[in-house]
Structures are given as C-alpha cells and as structure tokens.
Amino acid sequence: MLSNLVLHTGRDLDQLTTEDFLELRAALTPEGRKPPPGISVAWDLARGIARIPDQPIRHALLPGQLRTDELIDAYGLQCRSVRDVLVRYLNERRPVLDYSSFSALARTLGSFWADIEAHHPGIDSLQLSDQATEQWRQRVSVVIGRDGTRRPRLAKLNIFVPVRAFYLDIAQWALTDPSWASTPSDVLFAAATPAATPRTSSRSRRGCTSASESACLTCSLSPTAPTTIATIKPRYSPPRPPPRRAPSSNTVGRSTEASPSAPKPGRSDAAPLRPCWSM
C-alpha cells in the first residue's frame, strides 16, 4: 500500500498526507463493501513519518462538525429566503448550544420547512395559513411506519416547542433589531407561529399519557403474575451464610473493643449486626 501511494503521488513517504490515504481507500473500496485491511496497516506504519495525525485512521474518517448552511442545505429547501432565515437564526443560537443540541435543532427546523414545501409547493413566506398550519400539526402528530401503519407520536412536543420558539424568537428580536422584521422577497420573518400556545403550554400532558400507558401495561400483565411467580419460585434458593471461622491465636488476649464485629460496651440495646451474605 505504501509503495502504491508513493508511486501514485510521486512523493516520498514523509510527504504523504491524510488526503492521499483517504483517496486510495476510496479507490480500492468497492461500493457497498468493506475497505481492504491493508489501508489501516499502511496508515499505522506511516504514523510519525508521513504528514498524518498520530492516531488510528478511523479518527480521520469522522466527519466532524458541519457548518450551519451544510446542515440546512441537506434538506434541499427551494425558497432561498426562508433558507437564509433558518441559517441566520441557527447561527444566532449556535454559540449557546453544544453541537448535539444544535444539530438536533437544525434537523427539526430543516425538516419542518421541508415538509411545508413538500405539501405546499411554491410557498415563499413563513406566514402559514390556518389550513396549512392545521395540516402540518396533524402530520406531525402521527408516525407512519415502513409498512404503512400509523400510530400517535408520543414526543410531538419535541417538534412543536422548537418551531414555536423559532417564530417567537424572531418576533422578539424584531422589536430591537429591525433587520429581523424586514420582508425581502415577500418573506414575512416575524410571522405568527404555527405551533399555538394551547398545543405546547403544558408538558404535563405527555407525563399523564405516559403514566396512563404504564398503568394499562401493569393491568394487562397482572393476570400473568401468579404464573410467573410459580415458575421462578422453585428455581430460587436463598443465599447460604458464610462458614464461621475459628479465632486465630494472635487475637487471644486482645480487647473486644478492637474487634469491629463486637458490640461496644454500654450499648446492650443496640441491634445486632447483620451478617454479610455471599452471593
């Protein structure tokens, strides 16, 4: 592998870079198959010699953090003005969020507007009609499986809350920064939020739903409890106490106060110590 790299690039071993190894790995890896193991061996042999990091090659294959525009452009949004608003808003939020939370917020907002464009082609405003808003809420509230089955979405607030915060933040920022209230290309930035307050005002509803589902599950499994106990009980045996050890000769004549297991004088009513059962 190292000879192939040197011959292909025309550079000495100490001049090879990470890009050279990754290009060779991509060229020798058929689509849908594993890369040849010789790449990793060649990388390890060249560590400390070539211009590559002194760490395994798998670390060089990690994508790292993506830019805000890269996260949003992955959804292929058609309206450029709305796309720019999303990127600008996320750039404002990024300094106070860790990357995991930030990327989750970007995915939520990007998928939100991609869904709006898919069902309303040609839309170029964040101001949604009542009909479009209600249709979006109904789509978010249901999860469609691969086999076409439909079930209620339990964590729909994880989508409603970020979208509502997006609209409310822009409306709040527009009070102090006029650029957020501008409307280039007929895009109303400080628009009304599609996630209305009654839908997201109380997170206790989700807790009540989870509690009721747990109660239903307990009731459904209660009839099987006697059978389960009757099956497990014959196989269960209580742990045996450890064998008693004879006192050694070097402890003869010592005071009982030195023994950690002996009760202290003056505490006749103290509870006896429990033995430590071996598992």
Image (cartoon, rainbow, N blue to C red):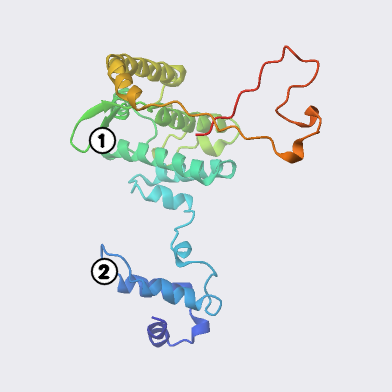
Front residue of 126/29: it is 29
Placement of 204 over or under 237, stated as above or below? above
Placement of 278 over or under 203, stated as above or below? below
- Asked whether residue 17 is in view, the answer is no
Can you tell which mark lies on residue 119? 1
When asked about the image quadrant of residue 187, the answer is top left
Query: Dot 1: within a 10 Å radius of its alpha carbon, few (fewer than 14), some, or many (20 or more) residues?
Result: few
Residue 252 pos. (x, y %):
77, 35
Can you tell which mark lies on residue 188? none
Residue 215 pos. (x, y %):
36, 15
- Asked whether residue 94 is in view, the answer is yes
Which residue is at 70% across, 28% downward?
261
**Local SS, label 2:** loop
Residue 104 pos. (x, y %):
45, 41
- Image quarter in which the N terminus is found: bottom left
Report whether 54 appears left or right of 138. right
Query: Dot 2: within a 10 Å radius of its alpha carbon, few (fewer than 14), some, or many (20 or more) residues?
Result: few
Which residue is at 77% across, 21% downward?
264
**Residue kind at label 1, given as amino acid type:** His
If you read the primary sequence from the N terminus, does the residue marked by circle 2 or circle 1 appear first?
Answer: 2
**Residue kind at label 2, given as amino acid type:** Pro
**Local SS, label 1:** helix
Residue 220 pos. (x, y %):
28, 16
Placement of 33 over or under 263, stated as above or below? below
Q: Label 2: which residue?
A: 30
Front residue of 251/142: it is 251
Front residue of 77/214: it is 214
Residue at the far left in the pictured view: 147
